[in-house]
Image: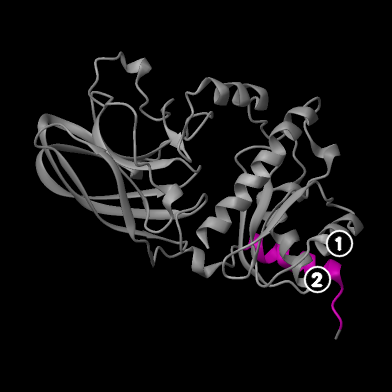
Amino acid sequence: MAVTPALCLQAAIAAAQAGERPAETALTNVIQPELGAAEFAPGDRIVITSVRGNREHLERGGRYVLEGSYTLASADSADLAWYATSRGPGGSAPVNDKEHVQITRGSGNFHLEKTLLNDGWLHASFYVNGHLHGGIYFGEKGIENTVLREKGWSDFSNDPPANKPDEKPAAAKTGGTALSDPANRAIMAWLGDAVPPPADLDARYSPTNLLAAFTALSKKQGFRIERLVLDDSEFPFLVYGVLAGKHQFGEIEAGLRQTKDYDYGGSVVGTTDKGGTDFSLNMIPHDQYPAGQAAACNRRLMVRLQMLADSVRQAE
């Protein structure tokens, strides 16, 4: 019995809305941690013993559990927290109660849970009276761009708290280039601030429905999805991931242009070391952009597309 593309799309959307992703629910994937920069007060220590999640890799949108042990000798009490230091401009992320725990002087074990909302540098750290008091950065073993190796600042400097990079270090390094460099600051100023989604965003362009629409279109074109993620950190939302085998993206572009609800708004496509096709794609029509924000969205769009495609290629 033939099934029309429209019915395929409706079925995919319904499945996504129903949460039919059993592999995403249990935190059973073991992730080997790679340790990076560390700094502690005398006698203090944090040891990471386990990282597990509902994704095979550390990535935005995944849920994870961090376990380990600690020794606090330099203060009577502290907040032991699992946070992320931003790699660039951006607002602070909300803090979940399960991301931190109050401890007292001595030794013990900890269990923290976190949903990754951005691609920041992960660290487990002590906070005393609200100020950073030493900790250790870590990422995923074998994926170098997830590990901060060199901080470029001290948690125990005499700088006023407002100038210390607790959650957003100005001197953090990406690819060996300091974000504090004047040339990099000029580029970031030109890119401008991230554009939030419109308050009246059509439900067709919600993260769930975008993923469902791409899944249905890939099925129609005969593409097998190996990995599919959505970046909703700013607008327009972008889908990215890996397709099995080598493909030209012309079929996806043509398919999108034939749909009533979606459109082709730019992409970056490459080949992974394993012979797959990594991609990032904007499928939101330009008439859905917030009023007066099209230029701001487009300035950042190609940079974002390239970054997302690179991130999945490096993770393969």
Q: Are marks 2 and 1 in contact (CB under 8 Å)?
A: yes
Give the magenta range: 2-18
**Residue for point 10% across, 30% down:** 74
**Residue for point 18% across, 35% down:** 40
Magenta highlight on residue 4:
yes
The amino acid on which the numbered mark 1 sits, given as a three-letter code, is Gly
Q: Mark 1 — residue? A: 255
Residue 161 percent across, percent down from the top left: 32, 17
Q: Residues within 10 Å of mark 1 (few under 14, many from 20)?
A: some
Is any part of residue 288 visible from this angle?
yes
The amino acid on which the numbered mark 2 sits, given as a three-letter code, is Gln
Task: Please give the label number shown on residue 221.
Answer: 2
Element marked by disc 1:
helix
- Does 90 sit left or right of 108 as displayed? right
- Cα distance in 3D space between marks 2 and 1: 8 Å
**Residue for point 25% across, 39% down:** 38
Is any part of residue 80 visible from this angle?
no
